[in-house]
Amino acid sequence: MKRLYEGEVLEVGNGAMIRVMAGGVLAVDGAVKIIGSLQYVTPQWQDIDFPIIIRTTGTGIPTLETLQGNMTAPRWQVNDYNVCEGQELIHSYQEGTPLYWHVHLVTNGLEATPAYVRFEIEYTWVNINGTLSANVTLNSGDLEIPANTPNRTMLLMSLGNFTPSGGKIGSHVWSRLKRVASTGAAPSADPFVTMLQAHVKVDTLGSTSIGVK
């Protein structure tokens, strides 16, 4: 059995390296057994999903329409919005680093010329035992769907980022996504937007206790 102690490093695949933190022991013998905590030598990336769940119909609400086969997804007109489910900053989150908002958009037809969409995201956040931050709204600016992009192509589109000052694991983030009018020509058929997520940096496999990194 190989044992690694505080400060020693192990490669875990795809170039990722983890370091044994203070008071930790890593035992490797077919399976990995951890006593204490491990830290990535170079922070890695992870997604936090803010689910888009359509519960009703009406003005301003994305409509569930056929995406492919028997599967449906929300199709967004200009001024449609969704208050997404709030999420916790995961235990592996590198505290105090930015969250990078993005959507997964699926095209609805083929455009002969470039088409453009634009989104707003309103958000607030809070640490455990803290007070909610002021709500902030980010505007993505025009996001291009290149000419001749095939129908039902999935595109990842960045909306902007924010840094929760003093943000800790267990912090909670709420968001409201809205499609707004673009300056450039909009697609002739409204696209699907299936996911709102935030890219975050992670520097550990988890936390050493429930509420403390």
Image (tube, helix red, strand yellow):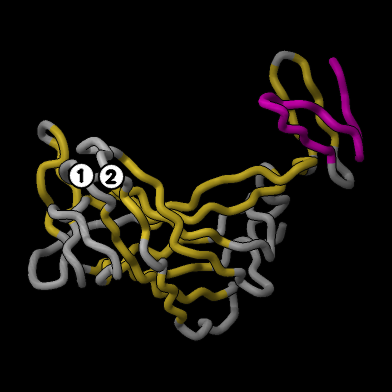
What residue is shown with label 1?
Answer: 112
Residue located 68% across and 56% down the image = 94
Quarter of the view holding residue 37:
top right
Quarter of the view holding residue 131:
bottom right
Q: Where's residue 92, x and y in %? A: 64, 49
Principal secondary structure, stretch drawn in magenta: strand
Instruction: Tell me the magenta residue range.
Output: 1-20
Task: Give whichever of discs 2 and 1 has the lower sequence position.
Answer: 1
What residue is shown with label 2?
Answer: 147
Q: What amino acid type is highlighted by mark number 1?
A: Ala
Residue located 31% across and 49% down the image = 145
- Dot label at residue 187: none
Q: Nearer the viewer, residue 23 or 41?
A: 41
In the image: residue 29, left or right of residue 58: right
Q: Nearer the viewer, residue 211 or 161?
A: 161
Q: Is residue 15 magenta?
A: yes
Q: Where's residue 103, x and y in %? A: 38, 54
